[in-house]
Amino acid sequence: MKSTAEVVRVKDAFAWIEEQRAIHLKAVTPKGDAVVLTAAEVRTLAARLEKLATILESLQSDDAG
């Protein structure tokens, strides 16, 4: 099974691809509080999530072909 070690991070918000099936997202501070992001940080996270989505689609199409 192909996988990616790509993990994106903005502050304490993390996203990664797991088992080539889904993007997992975790956003919590070490104290268990919600992560607060500025508009610029949200845009950065969104751009990085879009890149992960592209990687995931590529991995899934490689498996289908």
Image (cartoon, rainbow, N blue to C red):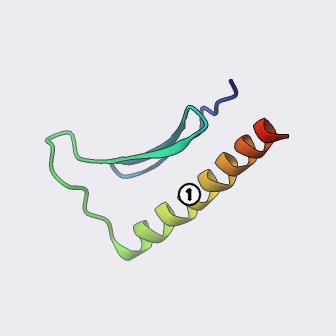
As drawn, is 42 to the left or to the right of 59? left
Rendered image quadrant of residue 35:
bottom left
The residue positioned farthest toward the front in the image shown: 64
The residue positioned farthest toward the right in the image shown: 65
Residue 42 image point, x, y percent: 41, 68
Q: How many dots with numbers?
A: 1
* Residue sitting nearer the eye, 24 or 9: 24
Tag 1 secondary structure: helix
Residue 5 image point, x, y percent: 60, 32
Residue 40 image point, x, y percent: 43, 73
The residue positioned farthest toward the bottom in the image shown: 39
Rendered image quadrant of residue 50:
bottom right
Please name the residue shown 85% across and 40% down the image.
65
**Residue type highlighted by circle 1:** Arg
* 36 versus 58 height, above or below: below
The residue positioned farthest toward the top in the image shown: 1
Residue 2 image point, x, y percent: 70, 28
* 48 versus 40 height, above or below: above
Please name the residue shown 77% across and 36% down the image.
63
Q: Which residue is mark 1?
A: 48
As drawn, is 28 to the left or to the right of 47? left
Which corner quadrant holds the N terminus? Answer: top right
Other-residue count near label 1 (Cα within 10 Å), few / some / many at <14 / 14–19 / ≥20: some
* 27 versus 4 height, above or below: below
Please name the residue shown 33% across and 71% down the image.
38
Please name the residue shown 61% across and 54% down the image.
53
